[in-house]
Image (tube, rainbow, N blue to C red):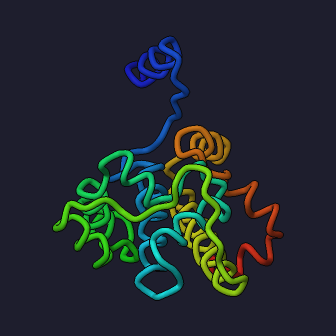
Amino acid sequence: DAITTWLLGFYEAIGKVPIRVKSRYGYALDPIFEGSFQAAAMCVEDGLGTTREVDWAATKALGLTVGPFTAMNLTGGNPITHHGLNMAHDRCHSWFRTPKLLDDAVKSGEAWDVPARGETVELPTDRMKAIVERLQGSYLGLCDEVLSAGLVDLSDFEMAVEIALDMTPPVRLARSLGFDKALALIE
């Protein structure tokens, strides 16, 4: 406890916003980051849209500054996320898996096709709705899994998701949707 308290103070002193989490593979935020990418990849695999379309729709669905495919391009995260999803499957929840789309991307080493900065991607209303609902339901389900595992305090989690992942925090999203709709999307 003394070391944890000292480290929290150290991180605050250097301008970070640390949160206290319990130990588990991926802690509190990796399952959200990697799981949201998985959900986006599954939208593409299921034919709901292209990587460009799903990436753009994800910014609208989850309040992201950049979509999950763009984030992978910017961070070089394909190999890390590939490994992380396999580990999360074994250590966190059976829902996690590495999509074939990600397997192929890691093998090819090619960047994802994503929208340019400021580009608007036109999607038919029904496809946009299907992508948005799939991503929102997956995201809220992932957040529920982390919170149900008791890894982090809700208020700390809301803050961390907003600051570190630059996403709409889960409770704020659920409130904006209405809790009945949010639950239906998760189910």
For this view, does 92 lie left or right of residue 179? left
Q: Residue at x 80, y 77 (%)?
A: 180
**Residue 173 to residue 152: above or below:** below
Q: Position of residue 19 (x, y in %)?
A: 53, 34
For this view, does 55 lie left or right of residue 89? right
Name which quarter of the figure residue 69 lies in.
Answer: bottom left
For this view, does 168 lie left or right of residue 142? right
Quarter of the rendering occupied by the N terminus = top left
Q: Residue at x 45, y 71 (%)?
A: 51
Name which quarter of the figure residue 186 lies in.
Answer: bottom right
Q: Residue at x 52, y 64 (%)?
A: 55
**Residue 104 to residue 145: above or below:** below
Q: Position of residue 130 (x, y in %)?
A: 64, 83
Front position in the image: 141 or 106: 106
Q: Position of residue 23 (x, y in %)?
A: 37, 45
Q: Residue at x 44, y 51 (%)?
A: 71
The residue sitting at the left extreme is 107
Give the mark count. 0
**Residue 78 to residue 12: above or below:** below
Front position in the image: 5 or 170: 170
For this view, does 127 lie left or right of residue 179? left
Q: Position of residue 30 (x, y in %)?
A: 41, 52
Quarter of the rendering occupied by the C terminus = bottom right
